[in-house]
Amino acid sequence: MSEAAVSRFDVGAVDEFPEGSITARTVADVEIVVIHQGGEFFALPDRCTHQRYPLHDGELLDGKIKCVHHGATFDLRTGRPTLPAVKKIQLFEAAVEDGRVVVTLHEA
Ligand code: FES
């Protein structure tokens, strides 16, 4: 029985992520977006689960990110999608430590 590998990445200083921003980053060859909304940080893959277009050019709604390509939204706390996406998006843990934003990726 093997446990999932967990890797933590410093993705930048808090100041690099203004309130209301969506920022693309690549960590360990994984393209992610880091979102700062309402004083909280969120991180998720930079790929819509609908047709895998990037999300970094998306639009932030209250507690959601909207993919501009066909209009699917994803809840930032649950990953729950709205149509036309039907598959949840994966969420990564994003935390602030000593003024830095740290994202945790889980690898199966
Ligand atoms: S690729 Fe995002 S809604 Fe279609």
Image: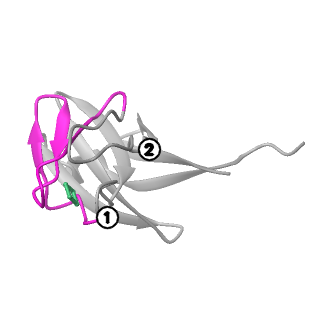
Does the Cβ of the disc 2 residue fall within 8 Å of ligand 1? Answer: no
Bounds of the magenta span?
52-78
Magenta stretch: helix, strand or loop mostly: loop
Q: Nearer the viewer, mark 1 or mark 2?
A: 1
- Measuring from the top left, give residue 51's x and y in whole percent: 29, 63
Camera-nearest residue between 76 and 102: 76
Does the Cβ of the disc 1 residue fall within 8 Å of ligand 1? Answer: yes
Q: Is disc 1 in contact with disc 2, using a CB cutoff of under 8 Å?
A: no
Camera-nearest residue between 47 and 13: 47
Occupied quadrant, residue 61: top left
93 within the magenta span: no
Q: Residue furthest bottom?
A: 29
Q: Reading the chain from its start, which is encountered first: label 1 or label 2? A: 1
Q: Amino acid at mark 2?
A: Gln
- Measuring from the top left, give residue 32's x and y in whole percent: 37, 58
| 19 relative to 78 in the view: left or right | left
| 78 relative to 83 in the view: left or right | right
Camera-nearest residue between 78 and 84: 84
Occupied quadrant, residue 35: top left
- Measuring from the top left, give residue 97's x and y in whole percent: 44, 37
Residue denoted by label 2: 90
Occupied quadrant, residue 45: bottom left
| 29 relative to 40 in the view: left or right | right
Q: Amino acid at mark 1?
A: Arg
Query: Residue, x 72% and y 46% (percent of image)?
Result: 4
Q: Residues within 10 Å of mark 2 (few under 14, many from 20)?
A: some
Residue denoted by label 1: 52
